[in-house]
Image: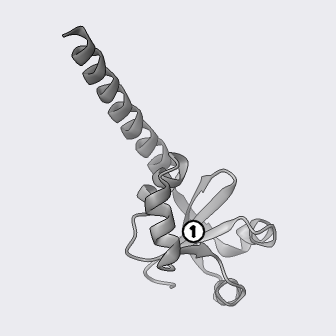
Amino acid sequence: MNEHIDEALELTRLEMDGEVLRAKLNQETGQIPWKELQRFFAAGKVVAVAPGLDLVEVAYCIATDRKAEVEAWMTSGRLAPVSDGQARQWFETDARLWSVVVKPWVLVQARADNS
């Protein structure tokens, strides 16, 4: 009986930890001009998240090493390093992007008004 209680408490703790991490990632998400991300792009550290995906959920999956979800997004092209062409377009249009850091990566997602 105590084993079941311990397991339930552990699951509850993990769920709470997950919610705390999601809240932290949400608070750390913000808009940033693409030009301020140039050095991270040059270092190969900027990853584009496709419109339609939840940026915070993607960050959470990366932070918690949820390989299956991350690999599925990468295979489908919905999560990928920012291409040179996309970087150039964002630079030329002075785009502002949603972003969140999940070390060592900077995840970015185009806003609806400057995709």
Question: Quick one: which residue is furthest to the top in this view?
Answer: 2
Residue 11 in the image: state x and y as whole percent: 31, 29
Residue 51 in the image: state x and y as whole percent: 43, 77
Viewed as shown, does residue 47 lie left or right of 59?
right
What residue is rendered at 64% in x and 71% in y? Answer: 33
Question: Quick one: which residue is furthest to the left in this view?
Answer: 1
From the viewer's side, name the closer residue of 40 and 66.
66
The correct choice, above or below, for 4 with respect to 102 in the image is: above
Q: Quadrant of the N terminus?
A: top left
Viewed as shown, does residue 108 lie left or right of 52?
right
Q: Which residue is mark 1?
A: 108
Few, some or many residues within 10 Å of mark 1 (<14, 14–19, 20+): many
What residue is rendered at 47% in x and 53% in y? Answer: 61
Viewed as shown, does residue 1 lie left or right of 72?
left
The correct choice, above or below, for 112 with respect to 37 in the image is: below
- Residue type at the position of mark 1: Val
